[in-house]
């Protein structure tokens, strides 16, 4: 007699998650783009080039849809998605003047 429980468990395929390997291409980044009207947009992504392209196709953030084209003016790597989101929230609270001062001292 076969043990059905052990038989069914042996055929279950579970995805393997490698928590020790981090693909540098999928690292989180914070970025700032300048819109056509000179306004600034702050966002996060794992692929900055693809995200800028999406913004310019009108598939990015709701704000940039009506303010395209956009140009990348700054980017910064983040340790994690959580860190990127916290930094994004911080920069979004800044005035435009403070962002412009920051950009002058941190060119791309």
Image (spheres, rainbow, N blue to C red):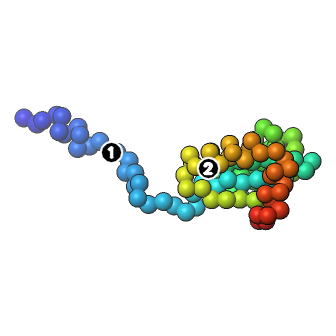
**Residue in view at x 48 percent, y 59 percent:** 22
Would residue 71 be seen by someone viewing this image from the given angle? Answer: no
Spot the residue most to the right.
Answer: 37
Residue at disc 1, secondary structure: loop
Spot the residue most to the left.
Answer: 1
The residue indicated by pointer 1 is 13
**Residue in view at x 58 percent, y 61 percent:** 25
Q: Earlier in the sequence, mark 1 or mark 2?
A: 1
Q: Residues within 10 Å of mark 2 (few under 14, many from 20)?
A: many
**Residue in view at x 60 percent, y 56 percent:** 78
Which quarter of the figure is the N terminus placed in?
Answer: top left
From the viewer's side, name the closer residue of 91 and 24: 91
Would residue 79 be seen by someone viewing this image from the given angle? Answer: yes
Q: Residues within 10 Å of mark 1 (few under 14, many from 20)?
A: few
Q: Position of residue 99 (x, y in %)?
A: 80, 52
Which quarter of the figure is the C terminus placed in?
Answer: bottom right
In the displayed structure image, the side of residue 25 where residue 44 appears, left or right = right
The residue indicated by pointer 2 is 84
Q: Position of residue 18 (x, y in %)?
A: 40, 55
In the displayed structure image, the side of residue 102 where residue 5 appears, left or right = left
Residue at disc 2, secondary structure: helix
> Mark 1 against mark 2, which lies toward the viewer?
2
Q: Find the distance from the CA under tag 1 to the CA under tag 2.
A: 33 Å
Q: Position of residue 42 (x, y in %)?
A: 75, 48
Q: Position of residue 106 (x, y in %)?
A: 76, 64
């Amino acid at each position: 007699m076969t043990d059905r429980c052990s038989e069914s468990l042996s055929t279950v395929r579970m995805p393997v998650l490698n928590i020790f390997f981090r693909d540098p291409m999928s690292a989180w980044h914070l970025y700032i783009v300048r819109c056509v009207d000179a306004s600034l947009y702050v966002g996060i992504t794992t692929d900055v080039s693809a995200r800028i392209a999406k913004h310019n196709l009108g598939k990015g953030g709701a704000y940039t849809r009506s303010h395209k084209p956009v140009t990348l003016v700054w980017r910064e790597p983040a340790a994690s998605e959580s860190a990127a989101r916290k930094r994004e929230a911080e920069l979004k609270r800044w005035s435009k003047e403070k962002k412009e001062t920051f950009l002058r001292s941190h060119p791309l």
